[in-house]
Amino acid sequence: MKKDKRRLKKHRCQICGVYGATQIHHIFGGAYRRISEKHDLVIELCPACHRKAHEDADFSWCLKHDCQLEWLENGGEMDDWMAMMHRSWVSLGEINRHKRAPAVDLVPPWSFDDEGVCG
């Protein structure tokens, strides 16, 4: 994996906070490993948390969920996510909270007076 400035290791686990030897974990591995690298969907973990990420399905699912949620919170689009990952780990309610309102070029049918009262 190519190191770049965004991914310089801080030698601190992003889960438990312990300092020391850390490893980069691809949140989406296997066939999605390159996508994880391309979109920086990786996390720095201590060896114990890294082992847990590979052995504990619930823990792994939570990492995927939080990663997708962060993608949406940072302006990523759900359509782009689905085209890239072919699966969602977040609920419909969480997705709807991050949808942007469509751009509208219309003047609103209401206005505010000088005292800020809508009329």
Image (tube, rainbow, N blue to C red):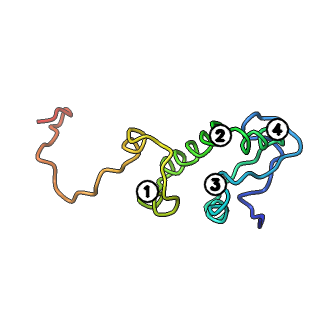
Q: Tell me which label, 3 or 4, sits earlier in the chain.
A: 3
| Helix, strand or loop status at disc 1 | loop
Please state if 2 lies on the left or on the right of 62 as rendered. Answer: right
According to the picture, the residue beneath numbered tag 3 turns out to be 28
Q: CA distance from mark 2 to mark 1?
A: 26 Å
Crowdedness of circle 1 by 10 Å Cα count: few (<14), some, many (20+)? some
The answer to whether the residue labelled 2 contacts the one labelled 4, judged by CB atoms less than 8 Å apart, is: no
| Helix, strand or loop status at disc 3 | loop
Q: Nearer the viewer, mark 2 or mark 4?
A: 2
Q: Which amino acid, by three-letter code, is at mark 3? A: Phe
Could you tell me residue 19's position as x and y percent? 85, 38
Q: Tell me which label, 1 or 4, sits earlier in the chain.
A: 4
| Helix, strand or loop status at disc 2 | helix
Could you tell me residue 58's position as x and y percent? 63, 36
Q: Which mark is residue 57?
A: 2
According to the picture, the residue beneath numbered tag 4 turns out to be 48
Crowdedness of circle 2 by 10 Å Cα count: few (<14), some, many (20+)? few
Q: Which mark is residue 77?
A: 1
Q: CA distance from mark 2 to mark 4?
A: 15 Å
